[in-house]
Image (tube, rainbow, N blue to C red):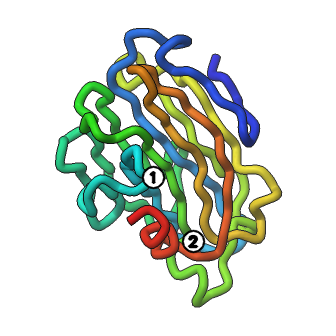
Amino acid sequence: MAISLNKGESYNLSKEFPGVKKLMIGLGWELTTKQLDLDASVFMIGANGKIINNNYLVYFNNLKSPDGALHHTGDNQTGKGMDDDESILVNLDAIHKEVTDLIIVVTINEAQENGYTFGLLKEAYVRIYDEVSKKEIVKYDLDAENASNSDIEFARLHRQNGDWTFTATGKGSGKGLEGYMEKYS
């Protein structure tokens, strides 16, 4: 059974799930009344707190990282269907040596223009599972405190001394993907 985290809680993947090499980051959501297009992105951050190169932002317009470690499976524009709506495959062994953090961000497309927020969603989550065994390792549910936000930094994977730790950050804002690009570039 997966560990369910609350905002601010962490889970050491390397210690608690030894031997894991390939992960899938899955994001899912259900709509309440409006059809929204959510977009998953991962910023590959170096020790200076910035992406190590502009090509190390993996999202709907850049589906693979240059090191081949991350692969976005594509943009789901409806949120319909069971299971994860967007997924990003992560090969931990292939991640560029300068990358210390993977920051997982979800934004709502055209949110500012249309006044869309996470309050229009239900059952939004991010989860990580072992790509080989398909075993869910950790899950973080979006909580109600982000209902007024149009984007959210869901979680971070942090590498330190060879170990990877998942932290449910849950930091929302209204700046969109561009705001995160400014922050991390």
Mark pair 1, 2: CA separation: 30 Å
Q: Which disc, if any, is residue 87?
A: none
The relative height of residue 125 versus residue 113 in the rendered view (above or below) is above
Q: Residues within 10 Å of mark 1 (few under 14, many from 20)?
A: some
Nearer to us of marks 1 and 2 is: 1
- Name the residue beneath numbered marker 1: 49
Q: Residue at x 35, y 60 (%)?
A: 59
Provide the secondary structure element on which disc 2 rests.
Answer: loop
Circle 2: residue type: Leu
Mark 2 and mark 1 in contact (Cβ < 8 Å)? no
- As drawn, is 94 to the left or to the right of 175? left
- Which of the two residues, 115 or 99, is positioned nearer the viewer here? 99
The relative height of residue 74 versus residue 15 in the rendered view (above or below) is below
Circle 1: residue type: Gly
The relative height of residue 52 versus residue 68 in the rendered view (above or below) is below
Q: Quadrant of residue 132?
A: top left
Q: Position of residue 123 (x, y in %)?
A: 70, 49
Q: Residue furthest bottom?
A: 113
Q: Position of residue 11 (x, y in %)?
A: 61, 24
Q: Residue at x 55, y 23 (%)?
A: 137
